[in-house]
Amino acid sequence: MTRRTSAAPRGALTGILLAGSILAGSAASAEGPLEGRSIRILGIGDPVFQVMQKIHGQMEEMGGGSIQLDVRPFDVLHQQVLLNAQNDVSNYDIIAVDLPQFGEYMPYLTDFGPMIEASGYDGSDFHEVAWTGAQFGGRQLGIPLQPHPEILAYRKDVFEEYGLEPPTTHEALLHAAQVISEKSDDMSGVCWNAARGTALGQTFITVMGDFGAAPIDMEKQGDDFEMGDIKPENMHPTIDTEAGKATADYLLAMEEVSPPGILNMAWDERVRVYANGGCAMTYIWAGRSAIFEQDDQSPAKGNTAYLPHPSGPGAPPRSTLGGWYLAIPANIDPERKELAWEAIQWLSSPEMIELYTQHGNCVSPRRSVSQLENVQAACPVIPAVDRMAEAGELAGWQRPPVPEIQKIVDVLGAEMHQMLSGDKSAEDALESSQRLLDREMRKAGYY
Amino acid sequence: MARISVEGLSKSFGAYRVFEDLDLAIPKGSYVCLLGPSGCGKSTLMRMIAGLDTEHGGHIRFDGKPVEHLTAAQRDVGMAFQNYALYPHLTVEGNLRFPMKAPLQKGRWSAAQMTERVGEVADLLQIRPLLGRAINQLSGGQQQRVSLGRALVRHPKVLLLDEPVTHLDARLRYAMRSELKRIHKVMGTTTVHVTHDQGEALAMADLLVIMRGGRIEQAAPAMEVYSDPATAFVAGFLGAVPRTVLTLPLSERDGTAGLRLGGQHVPLPPALVAAARQAGGGTVTIALPASAFAVDPDGPVEGTVAAHEMIEGAQRLVLQADGQRVNIQRSETAPVANGDRLRFRVDASEGLLFDAATGDRLRPPLRRAA
Amino acid sequence: MSRNREAKRAAIVLVSPAMLLLFALNIFPVLYAVYISLHHWSLASPNPPRFAGLFNYQELWYDGRFSNSLGVSATFIALAVLIELALGFGLAFLFNRKLRGLETLRKLSLLPVMAMPLVVGLVWFYMLNQNFGVTNWVLSLFGIGAQPFLTDGTLAMLSVVLADVWQWTPFVMLVIFAALQSLPEYVFEAARMDGLTEREIFRRITLPLLRPAILVVLVIRAIDAFRMIELVFMMTKGGPGGSTEVLPWYIYTTGFLSLDLGYAAAMAVVMIVLVTLGAQVFVRKIADPGAA
């Protein structure tokens, strides 16, 4: 029955994303890094891989080989990576890995270290935080493709009209949102992920980061946390804490100044509502800003400014870094490893990163690309993110790379939704989240 | 119990006219069989009497009172359907009780009376042990009885039976026939029984109505219909070995009138000669019993065997002669094959004459045949 | 004797592929689910599965989210199936009349059944969405304010029910329509001769005769509704709070998002048991026509 109930949405989802699987057909020329060979990639239905689908023919021509690109929804990708890891030989040469997933996938990935050394590859063009984000225990497990932070986008024109300060803090954001909600007929204050489940769960922990706190008891290291070496005693959940309470209160306060139907709003919808002028601010994964920046119809185009995730009282601004890396499965056929490495160098090269930005993926982890004029014109968010990266305002510890991260997100996504729906008080929701996660950690045998 | 009279009945389905000006009188308490080939309109006629089909011209009267405007239930008619039409979700007893619980019967039956009446009917039909059974646990014969019981249970004025024994096997069919007669004797209800089985009709009917193509060919007591048919169709329709019906030219030889068959002269008895003179056009239709023909190597007429079969100690033959079919029955059996040529004799003394054009009987008849 | 044995052997040989298939496709997965449910089995954890005994089942007992999802599932099944039955019944009778145009209309009315449930969920999500949904726009034409179709506990449940009703009423209609068409005409004539009015014929003849068809469609729809996950996935994700979190959706998030296979399997086993028990009751009623 487990199989049956799960197969329905999965099968159907794949159906919806039928365009996801593109099999190379044409005989490719032997010029380019692929040298007439065929490369198999398991990707995600996010902007960067969607761009690759869009320009698939062009890429095969450039690469000089065929590219089999299987694009899957998040959950399905997660399952397939784990299932593929059980095979004797991997079915894919390259897989997409989300930054917080490295903790979970660590045993199943190839270390790029020796390859980097042998080929003299230079990673210094990448943002420091993006490059080192994939380092675990001295091993480089991924090459940045689309690492980007969740930040805040707001309408400069609207803020000017009402004489409001840029919303750099929770307080400023709530104040601005309130003013706009009251004064504007059809514009709400702020759009954010409040839909039940993963969407709200992610919101909770990223906002908790605004208070300088992580969802589990990790070692503090300055304003940030030590992530390279998470021990069992670090696995105690820290939800029912002051920071947790402050987070819950902030979500409740935001609910008041949100557009209608906020309780069902998630990634796509919040950006679309913002793009249509339905709200004056939105939390957004930076790369998705192309949705309005590259749409002439949108009132937000050219009128949007970007800020780091607004911070809570007394805490420095920290935007959660996430997004996609390219990695090589540990069980890859050794004879294909060199090809995979060649392909990854090519796919993450400055020329390709620049190409992606021109087709709707507003992410550049490379300083050299961020400087380009045409890139900045198509994606005003890129220089803004660059500044945040230089200022050290991007971090990944809000979503600790531990196997239980999805469970944490799921529990918070359910409990906090009860709180937002008025079924539970903040105290009750925090208490039961803490209790459920504590039970989970014990079950997993950490303590 | 009621007297039923049908007057000037007409009915059409679209352009197809089933009846035109049909008359029929059914005496009170009689047992009437409507007999005819399929499509003759017998079932339609019954459904009109029942009130299931009310769109027709002409009149139907029960005891002289017109009933066209009455619903089936108001006419107080009980009907047993060809395929029983029992209520499959009720038990036998439930089916028998059902008509007494219908709205028009309200107040007529107390609970005790109902139980008593169900008991009576069950005894009459010998189905008392079945009362608690579900319908799908019954055999065809048992369902037939229940269906009959349901039609009888509230003492209807008229009982209508649509092919009531057709679906039963031969043994049951015979048993059920006598049962129906017995029940009719006991109840005395005016009964209309539709069938296409002439043996059944001959055995049961007080009044036998032969129908063809939406017309009544003859309505008379069974034996009369058999021995003194009013039309050529009736003459050739009835009997285990039906009469041979031949349409032949009149001829004359040696001063005696006769018919020409296979180039031979077949003399007519004097009584028939008188009748034959009424015929126009020089031809006449004659119906002859099987006994009128005898296979004889020296016989005057020759025919080809078209069909043959054995029945208890006798042989039936169908011979093709002069383009017409002759039914012969002989008691000695000899091997024959289709296509064999046989000679036979003809004795027209038992013949019945009909108008070749209309099929109507040409009288005077000779005598009442046995 | 030897012929008999040979026949027996042939029978075994001929039947065994079917039996193997049945085992592989039906029985084995259930047994495997039971096996998984007796383990701490997390796909996310690098540790191998550990035997857990009845731990997962004990957890279920204390899990408020699990009991909530059972209640939500029960509510959903009851609402959806009853409404579908009532509407499907009415439509079947309407279509049973031999009126011009109804034939075409009946064929058209089957379209929703052919749609993929996930697409149905997506369509209804967009129609009922408060920010760009057409439903609230239509309501506004009548001067009715925007309704929180997907974010109010009661309305969200009704919205999911509505989508399910939209999709499956034609199926119920079809089954009952087919049953109506196959009812013996003679029985109705007999009832008319017995003097029953049309209403009484409906109550005392038609309904009892349709009973098996009604029960069959009830079982099929109830089991189907119990397994429904696509509409919740597309429309509400189980929200607001947990007011539309049906059991399969909780199983899905546990097993395929959090990858806690052991616990999800325990829930799935409970679900199988409930479905089997529930279906037995109905199947017995179908098999026993005497119990009117």
Image (cartoon, coloured by chain):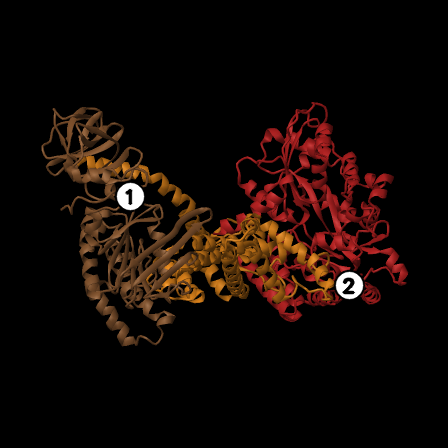
Q: Classify residue A343 by image quadrant.
A: top right
* Disc marking residue A312: 2
Counting other residues with Cα less than 10 Å from the Cα at mark 1, is it few (<14), some (14-19), or many (20 or more)?
some
Q: Are marks 2 and 1 on the same chain?
A: no
Chain A colour as displayed: red
Q: Position of residue B213 (x, y in %)?
A: 35, 45
Q: Is residue B255 above or below residue A187?
A: above
Counting other residues with Cα less than 10 Å from the Cα at mark 2, is it few (<14), some (14-19), or many (20 or more)?
many
Q: Chain of mark 2?
A: A
Quadrant of image for the N terminus of chain C: top left
Q: How many marks?
A: 2
Q: Position of residue A56 (x, y in %)?
A: 70, 34
Colour orange belongs to chain = C
Q: In the image shown, does B17 or A173 lie closer to the viewer? A: B17
Q: Is residue C12 left or right of residue A175?
A: left
* Disc marking residue B58: none
Chain B colour as displayed: brown
Residue drawn at 67 percent across, 56 percent down: C127
Q: Position of residue C218 (x, y in %)?
A: 46, 59
Residue type for callout 1 = Asp
Residue drawn at 24 percent across, 72 percent down: B116
Q: Circle 1 sits on which residue?
A: B360
